[in-house]
Image: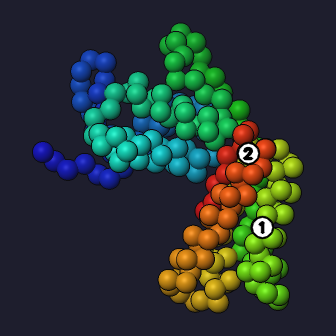
């Protein structure tokens, strides 16, 4: 048997055909014209999440198009989009509501803590930043610049063990803060 590319699954159609395809391509096909109104990065992350679920969590290479569509629907809804996998073909596809994405740059937060006690000031500032951003009632709260932030706080030019440890601490801290916030029920958290 030929080995599949890492981003592919074998899709079983209603006719019983088995077709190897990239999950991102199938995601774009299922979303149709609605995919143009969604941030391409969200589509990429959604397809990667569904791929991981089937390949690694369920250990499957073969998936029906229907199973894939239902799993994709759950992921896209997690990103705050209004999509339905069980639409009848006669109905026109519903345009997904664009999620309100609020972003925060972790590297800028680290820069403001640089003249002070670095991590001692950074973590409380990070908690306050999360609260401020959640007050804007987003569908997605996205913290970006993690790698540069960590290198700046660690005072490192290259990634090392200390950087990895600090990276893990920041992500764990964000998750802990997230768990205590009541607004998290209507919002997704992304850290990149």
163 to the left or right of 59: right
Q: Residue at x 75, y 72 (%)?
A: 123
Residue pushed farthest left?
1
Kindly identify the residue that appears in the image at 62 percent across and 64 percent down: 171
Establish if 48 lies above or below 108. Answer: above
Q: Which image quadrant for residue 166?
A: bottom right
The secondary structure type at the circle numbered 1 is: helix
Identify the image quadrant of residue 98: top right
Answer with left or right where residue 96 lies relative to residue 91: right
In space, the residues marked 2 and 1 are separated at their CA atoms by: 16 Å
Mark 2 or mark 1: whose residue is earlier in sequence: 1
Kindly identify which residue carries mark 1. Answer: 126
Neighbourhood count class around disc 1 (C-alpha, 10 Å): few under 14, some 14–19, many 20 upward: many
Asked whether residue 171 appears in the rendered view, the answer is: yes
Other residues around mark 2 within 10 Å, as few (<14) / some (14–19) / many (≥20)? some
In the picture of the structure, the residue carrying the numbered disc 2 is 184
């Amino acid at each position: 048997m030929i080995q599949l590319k890492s981003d592919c699954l074998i899709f079983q159609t209603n006719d019983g055909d088995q077709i190897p395809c990239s999950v991102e391509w199938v995601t774009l096909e299922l979303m149709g014209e609605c995919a143009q109104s969604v941030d391409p990065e969200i589509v990429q992350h959604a397809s990667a999440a569904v791929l991981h679920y089937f390949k690694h969590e369920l250990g499957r290479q073969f998936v029906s198009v229907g199973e894939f569509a239902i799993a994709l629907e759950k992921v896209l809804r997690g990103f705050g989009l209004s999509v339905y996998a069980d639409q009848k073909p006669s109905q026109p596809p519903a345009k997904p509501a664009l999620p309100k994405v609020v972003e925060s740059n972790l590297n800028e937060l680290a820069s403001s803590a640089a003249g002070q006690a670095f991590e001692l000031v950074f973590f409380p500032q990070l908690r306050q930043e999360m609260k401020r951003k959640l007050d804007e009632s987003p569908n997605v709260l996205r913290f970006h610049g993690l790698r540069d932030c960590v290198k700046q706080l660690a005072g490192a030019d290259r990634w090392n063990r200390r950087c990895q440890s600090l990276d893990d601490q920041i992500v764990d801290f964000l998750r802990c803060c997230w768990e205590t916030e009541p607004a998290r029920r209507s919002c997704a958290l992304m850290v990149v």
